[in-house]
Image: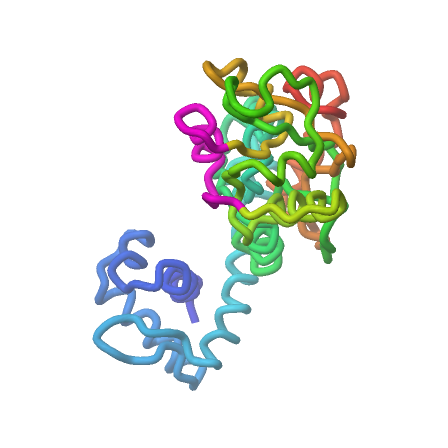
Amino acid sequence: MLIKQLEYLTALAREKHFGRAAASCGVTQPTLSAGIKQLEDDLGVLIVERGQRFQALTPEGEHVLTWARRIMANVEALAQDMSETRGSLVGRLRMGVVPAALPMVTLLTTRFVDAYPRTTVTVSSATSVDIQRGLDDFSLDAGLTYLDNEPLVHVRSVPLYHERYMLVTPANGPMKGRDAVTWREAAALPLCLLSPENQGRRIVDRHFREAGAIARPRVESNSLVALCAHPRLGTLSSVLPEALVATLGPLPDVRAIPLVEPEASHSVGLIVPEREPLVPIAAAIFRIAQAIDADAVAAAGATP
């Protein structure tokens, strides 16, 4: 069994396509297929359901994949650890970030790349469920997500800021001249909200229910860009995090109004897997999160 064969398997599981998996590994498709076939022969199990195209992994293949991801993560951790002993951490930090926290991820990433100039960072927009899954299956090193709403398991966390909520609405719309809007009032407006698979949407729906209302959005999207664009270019209103509104700055023909009754606030922070030893690159971003002070958070437009 070779490490390369395990790399081929994890790439195939990720890409779900032989050609793309081979390209991501820098080999030809026949080389990748031969490597996986050799892995099957070595282990004595069928890993991939055979067909002209990739169909799925067999149940045995899924089991092998779990071990392959663990072994590949340890190989990467070993390389990172040795680079640290030579005085300069090398590697790629893979972060999953819930959509509402994307404007705040720079609190971490700018400090990280400055402190570790031989590293790179991949930031992916992901649901909180996908972040938890990515940490569990070794496909992510860290996540930026909610800490106090839905359960997190087998993670270490560092709180960074509290998310509060604004109604972003056309300046000449029904809420013209208002300094605050209740959640119940907001629910009666034509809305554009995050799609239901996002924890941010589930949080917003909960606060609507606490106000005795149910929001029935006209448009749903997993893109914050779409949520920002609709109030500017149409008649819909959106519920957006205060930090995002601060990052965007003033928008023409749009007002951002605090939502009240209830006063809603949720903790957002960094999470990494609860493992010993922690992968060096995850340990590095965790130390950076611990060192961020309240003034830096406030300067970024959020509430510490």
Q: Is residue 268 visible?
A: yes
Question: Which quadrant of the rendered structure holds the N terminus?
Answer: bottom left
Instruction: Confirm whether the magenta stretch covers residue 75.
Output: no
**Residue sitting farthest toward the bottom:** 44
Which residues are drawn in magenta? 217-236
Instruction: Residue at 52% x, 18% y: name it.
Output: 171
In the figure, is residue 153 to the left or right of 24?
A: right
**210 or 135: which is nearer to us?**
210
The x, y position of residue 301, in whole percent, is 65, 19
In the figure, is residue 112 to the left or right of 182?
A: left
Instruction: Residue at 35% x, 64% y: name it.
Output: 16
Instruction: Residue at 78% x, 36% y: name it.
Output: 262
**158 or 32: which is nearer to us?**
158
**143 or 251: which is nearer to us?**
251
Quadrant hosting residue 249 = top right
The x, y position of residue 32, in whole percent, is 29, 65
Q: Is residue 115 visible?
A: no
